Amino acid sequence: MTTKSDALEIQVNKNTNNPDQAWNVLSRKIKKTSCNHLPLDLPIYPDKVRFVCISDTHNSIERMKYEIPSGDILLHAGDFTMNGSLKDVEKFSKNLENLQSKFSYIVLIAGNHELSFDKNCDRNTVTQDPKIYLKNFLYLEDNLIELFGIKIYGSPWQPKFGNWAFNLNRGEEILKKWNKIPNECDVLITHGPPLGFGDIINGGYHVGCCELLSTIRERVKPKYHIFGHIHEDPGVWTDEQTTFINASTCNLRYKPANPPIIFDIPLPEGH
Ligand code: 5GP
Ligand code: MN
Ligand code: MN
Ligand code: MN
């Protein structure tokens, strides 16, 4: 069935290549507020699905300053290695296996550092498929899964910065990827932030993706959007429609200093 919203076409922001300027304009009509972080020792309720979010662990998941608490679903928003070597992916996978008893599911996406996951990246020298190491987990790359009746979509793309994996031009090129996100999506995971939320780099500029923000606000309207990539702006915010979480674990010096971020979604009826 085609709904009105299916047909809704997101337009490229005319300031897309100057995200700081784009936010300057958009922030006048978007109500952005910070949210309290839930305490990591919050009890797990039987009528809720507990999500535990981490990102940008960069070969350091076993050395996190804060212990990863138990939950129903662990989400990792990419950059789990430094360069995606098979050795590092295998080591990461062993570390994830040690966490498996704490969760029903582990869901992850790649980030720009996972060079071996992007077969079109010219810096990718690995011929083997690194995903064989992740077969015990739910690796998402532009696809949707449903867990406990909750729809979760994951995508690794981010606006080009340097020469990395899953880099795309701002505007039309990256919007094509966001157009694949179904309207029906409760939890969206991307590696990079949308414009305006958890996207302020050292120096004070916004670098998030304009087309991702438009897609989220105007079409998909997920309950939660989880990402990382901008290590210096972790936190939780809302625009009164979506809760935005920058779950970056590493700081700018690639030290795993930040705590995981948790949230709960009421268990849908019949689950
Ligand atoms: P990573 O290399 O782990 O993907 O990103 C690490 C850091 O690179 C971020 O915390 C941020 O400081 C910087 N960075 C990432 N993407 C961008 C971008 O698009 N623009 C700018 N100026 N810096 C970025
Ligand atoms: Mn929706
Ligand atoms: Mn990173
Ligand atoms: Mn990154």
Image (cartoon, rainbow, N blue to C red):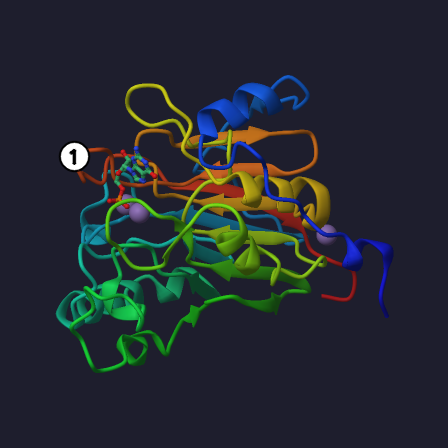
| Residue beneath the point at 51% across and 50% down | 51
- Residue 126, horizontal then vertical, whole percent: 18, 75
Pick the front one: 271 or 225: 225
| Residue beneath the point at 45% across and 25% down | 20
Tell me where residue 74 sits by quadrant: bottom left
Relative to 201, say whether 59 is above or below: below
Quadrant for the N terminus in the image: bottom right
| Residue beneath the point at 40% across and 71% down | 137
Q: Is residue 41 left or right of residue 113?
A: right
Quadrant for the C terminus in the image: bottom right
Tell me where residue 268 sits by quadrant: bottom right
- Residue 253, horizontal then vertical, whole percent: 16, 34
Residue underneath mark 1 = 253
Q: Is residue 44 left or right of residue 167?
A: right
Classify mark 1: helix, strand or loop.
Answer: loop
- Amino acid type assigned to the residue bearing label 1 in the image: Arg
Pick the front one: 233 or 17: 17
- Residue 19, horizontal then vertical, whole percent: 46, 31
The crowding category of the residue bearing disc 1, from other C-alpha atoms within 10 Å (few below 14, some 14 to 19, many at least 20), is: few
Q: Is residue 31 left or right of residue 15?
A: right
| Residue beneath the point at 32% across and 68% down | 118
Pick the front one: 214 or 55: 214
Relative to 221, say whether 201 is above or below: above
Does the beta carbon at disc 1 come under 8 Å from ligand 1?
no
